Image (cartoon, rainbow, N blue to C red):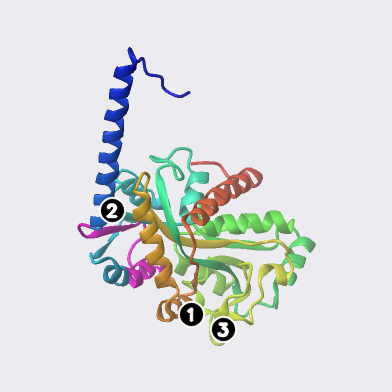
Amino acid sequence: MKPTYRIGAPHRRDLLKAAFSSAALGLVAGAASAQQTWPARPIRWILGFAPGGAGDITARLLAPRLHNLLGQPVLIENRPSAGGIVAAEAVARAEPDGHVLLLVTSTSPTAAAFYRALPFDTERDFAPVGMISTFGHALLAAATSPWRNLAEVIAAAKARPGSVNLGSISVGTAQHFAAERFKLMAGIRAETITYRSTPDLLNAIATGDVHLGFETLPPVIGQIGPGGRVKALAISSEERFPALMEIPTVTEAGLPGYVAESWNGIQAPARTPGAVVERLNRELNHLLALPDVRDRLLTLGLVPQPSDPRALQERLSRETAIYRRVMEEAGIAQQ
């Protein structure tokens, strides 16, 4: 309902209208001035992960290049926590002036689905800037496994329900949801075993403690192939990964329609000026198109994903709904 104003006489209404017009012009001038001077100081880019992972490496690859384009340093702050909640809360509560950014990842929709309550709203408390990259999950088996392809795994699991188990890292992660979704779509009964870290999971796969493991491509890309302890039976992306074209997608390998991708991007606090978001998006897309940046991301197992802000917001909303449905159908309890 629109607000109403009690105006006494016509001449008073005219005076108010003039006053409002002057105020509006002042606000526009002020906003324009703020946008022209942005950034006025170093930009803090907050990450919900420890140094050394794919997200951290990606941010440190882009930060100095953003510095060159924007004229102010981009400082990386690592604030690791479950679900990236600490980092996200810090950005949600920051001044919306474009000087604090978040490396948002697929942990955002998984956290929204997995936790009963968060100290922020994953969609309303942030302004989307744009995607950085996507990366599929590798479906891994021991290098010595007798299974040659994913179809054989599914056939074995259906022939002897409960005889095949699956592995992922912690409950509530994108990898865990990928394993649960795989069971639902393949129509198999299998136990999912979770591990605290990627090295623990890879060791379990290599030794045969779990028959099929789900992990994002970046931390395992160097261990797939001749001489490695694990082999990839499929990649969960819509398309084959450019550097591993010999490995089929899950759809090609026998489970049509299965896609599970992790991703990262940039968000700012809600109400960040539109001109600032537009400038950040433009510079980010410019960097992702540079050959050296693209090649480095591909080496890490990441596919550059230039986009507009809407694409990031739509992905976030879509995946939150998917993860909530997977939780319900798989019987996973919220925390």
Q: Nearer the viewer, residue 229 or 207?
A: 229
Classify residue 251 by image quadrant. Answer: bottom right
Q: In the image, residue 233 lies at what x, y percent?
A: 64, 74
What residue occupies the far front of the structure in this picture?
Answer: 11
**Which of the two marks, 2 or 3, is nearer to us in this view?**
2
Classify residue 19 by image quadrant. Answer: top left
Name the residue tied to disc 2: 35
Task: Specify which label sits upstream in the sequence, 1 or 2.
Answer: 2
Q: Amino acid at mark 3?
A: Gly
SS for callout 3: loop
Name the residue tied to disc 1: 222
Name the residue tied to disc 3: 225
**Is label 1 in contact with label 3 (beta carbons under 8 Å)?**
no
Q: Where is 20 relative to 13, above or below?
A: below
Q: Amino acid at mark 1?
A: Gly
> Residue 60 colored magenta?
yes
Residue 190 in view, yes or no = no
Q: Amino acid at mark 2?
A: Gln
| Residue at x-position 32% and y-position 66% | 51
What residue occupies the far top of the structure in this picture?
Answer: 8
State the separation of the CA atoms marked 2 and 3.
50 Å
| Residue at x-position 66% and y-position 71% | 249
**Is label 2 in contact with label 3 (beta carbons under 8 Å)?**
no
SS for callout 2: helix
Q: In the image, residue 303 lies at what x, y percent?
A: 51, 71
Range shown magenta:
40-63
